[in-house]
Amino acid sequence: MTALRGLWPEMQDTCTSLGLMLSIVLFMGLARVVTQQQLNRPMAHAFVLEFLATFQLCFCTHELQLLSEQEPRHPTWPLMLIYFFSLVHSLTLVGTSCNPCGVMMQMLLGRMSAEMGGMRLLAQLIGALGSRYCMGALWSLELTKYHVRDRSFACRDPIQVDLPKAVIIEAICSFIFHSALMHFQEVRTQLRIHLLSALITFLVYAGGSLTGAVFNPALALSLHFKCFDEAFLQFFIVYWMAPSLGILLMVLVFSFFLPWLYNNNTTNKKE
């Protein structure tokens, strides 16, 4: 009984954090419904939806990162939360990417205009920074013992390997995730969201202790904004250039190299 009483404050803090994340998901969902009903202009509609989606993703990830650092008794607890909220985001953020690399992929494949891409990138940037400062204000209320305002303004360097390895890890994570995202489009939705959520969880498990396995420039900016200020070049290379390089390689491999290789083999067989 005494042990349960000792665990109760920790459980209460965890439930408060989960409640905050679910509340923001519901609030952003309501805002998306209003946006879809009231905004008819495509550019403004896309901007607001992308802003709301990026804000939701970054807000929840800030709180998830906070929970994962508390070293719970069950080591798989953070991974379970990542998988669950990846499912939630997949279900609620349909039609948005929340990731500059996703916009870059669509533009390189010719599926999105430069104007629409620029608008979505701007929305993601504002959403990412907005969520960061919103979290700072929320943590200053000290709703749990882990909520400390100074935390949001401190640099917690997640890079635990040298620069070349960090670049390779983020590029590979970006390559794998967006390759799966592109090729899972034909899979039925009920299965696709579970596959992508499991993949995200695996990538975070594999690379989280090395670089954080972010593979999202907007999310990285929101999570590590102070680090960008203190070591801009290193974080720019690892969290912006490396994921973009992964996208570029993916497009080159699947849209140019593999089709060329297939056509070349077909021609040789005919000869």
Image (cartoon, rainbow, N blue to C red):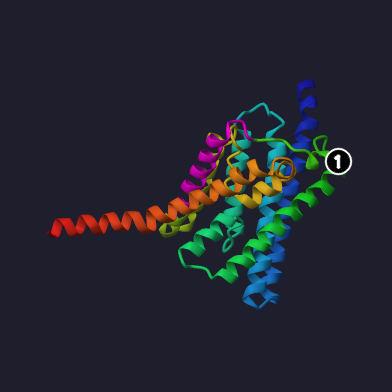
Q: Quadrant of residue 226?
A: top right
Residue reaching furthest left?
Answer: 271
Q: Can residue 11 be seen in the rendering of this structure?
A: yes
Q: Main secondary structure of the magenta part?
A: helix
Give the image location of residue 245, x and y in percent.
50, 49
Give the image location of residue 13, x and y in percent.
78, 37
**Residue sitting at x 51%, y 47%:** 174
**Residue sitting at x 57%, y 61%:** 94
The relative height of residue 138 versus residue 209 in the rendered view (above or below) is below
Whether residue 164 is in magenta: the answer is: yes
The relative height of residue 73 versus residue 251 in the rendered view (above or below) is above
Is 126 placed left or right of 91 in the picture? right
Q: Which residue is tagged 1? A: 142
Q: Nearer the viewer, residue 58 or 74?
A: 58
Residue reaching furthest right?
Answer: 141
Q: Which residues are magenta?
A: 159-180
Is 265 placed left or right of 168 in the picture? left
- Circle 1 Cα neighbour tier, 10 Å, few/some/many (<14 / 14–19 / ≥20): few
Q: Quadrant of residue 14?
A: top right
Quarter of the image that includes the N terminus: top right
Q: Can residue 191 be seen in the rendering of this structure?
A: no
Give the image location of residue 145, x and y in percent.
83, 35
- For badge 1, the amino acid type reads Glu
Give the image location of residue 171, x and y in percent.
51, 44
Residue reaching furthest front?
Answer: 233
How many marks on residues? 1
**Residue sitting at x 71%, y 37%:** 67
